Image (cartoon, rainbow, N blue to C red):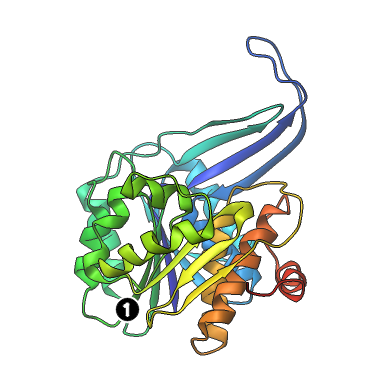
Amino acid sequence: MIYTVTFNPSLDYIVRVKNFKAGQINRTYYENILPGGKGINVSIVLNNMGHKSTALGFMAGFTGREICDRLAAFGVASDFIEVKNGMSRINLKMKSDEETEINGQGPDITEEDIGKLYEKLDALKEGDLLVISGSVPNTLPGDMYQRIMNRLSGRGIDIVVDAEKDLLVNVLQYHPFLIKPNNHELGAIFGVELKTRDEVIPYAKKLQEQGARHVLISMAGEGAVFISEDGQIMTSRAPEGKVVNSVGAGDSMVAGFLTGFLETGGDCKTAFLTGLCTGSASAFSPDLATRPEVEALLASLGAD
């Protein structure tokens, strides 16, 4: 079974405004409300690709209930802990001449709530797969990733981590199954600027040397780099297409990689290319990737 964790899920209120002017009344010409959060995006795309998962995390208030209802409408099972104080976030994502985001704070998560999450994680079994991704809200301990991975260490559970800087680096000692920073996040870890696939490779290897099993680096229009547990190095250009919405593209890459890996019994090349095309399919669409969109891009793409 696949599980995803989203510590601070949201309702994403997506609007488009022509020529936004600060300090004035602006009217939208497009509106959409989606359940948001990196783990949630992974679960939605996994479902679109034909794989069930359960979304874990914290929710609160009427917005939390709406997140669960909208996930159910996508066919995604959720098992969130209901937090008593506050409400789940509403994040405004406005697209005009420039993109602007205003993100909510989220509920007040207590030690009791954290304990309930641990109980759910303790129920995972050998062979299960867990995806932990996204930021940790200020109401949670900053080492939540480490606490979870230490708790599950040695139990035969493969863990995927998609996070930035210390959140990622500090869990490498637990040998995550897959990590997926982008090239900017990878560069920030080592204090360098990485623009090309060739530049990325040695730094991706450094993360593997520190403990990661598989390393997948997303690079937007430049494509992606993958280094497998057994040392294979793969690179690919990005599929051709017009970027419509980059939100969720990295999460979609994770879901696509897992889809390809699971469906082939561990073929890394198929997993890599499926991940790349799934991320691109989401970027080329106002919604998250669907299987037909991914398969169309796969048919047009080969590895370098």
Q: Give coordinates of residue 183: x percent, y percent.
A: 47, 52
Front position in the image: 61 or 120: 120
Q: Residue furthest front?
A: 198
Front position in the image: 67 or 6: 6
Q: Quadrant of the N terminus?
A: bottom left
Is 79 drawn above or below residue 156 in the view shown? above
Q: Residue at x 69, y 14 (%)?
A: 21
Q: Quadrant of the C terminus?
A: bottom right
Q: Is residue 73 left or right of residue 234?
A: right
Q: Residue at x 55, y 69 (%)?
A: 235
Where is residue 118, by image quadrant? bottom left
Is 241 drawn above or below residue 253 in the view shown? above
Q: Give coordinates of residue 197: x percent, y percent.
A: 52, 60
Q: Give coordinates of residue 3: x percent, y percent.
A: 43, 70
One can see residue 70 in this view: no
Q: Residue at x 70, y 69 (%)?
A: 294
Residue of label 1: 157
Secondary structure, mark 1, is: loop
One can see residue 303 in this view: yes
Where is residue 155, by image quadrant? bottom left
Front position in the image: 278 or 211: 211
How dense is the environment of label 1, judged by Cα within 10 Å: few (below 14), some, or many (20 and up)?
A: some
Q: Residue furthest bottom?
A: 265
Tell how many labels.
Answer: 1
- Please, what is the three-letter code of the amino acid marked with disc 1? Ile
Q: Give coordinates of residue 191: x percent, y percent.
A: 33, 44
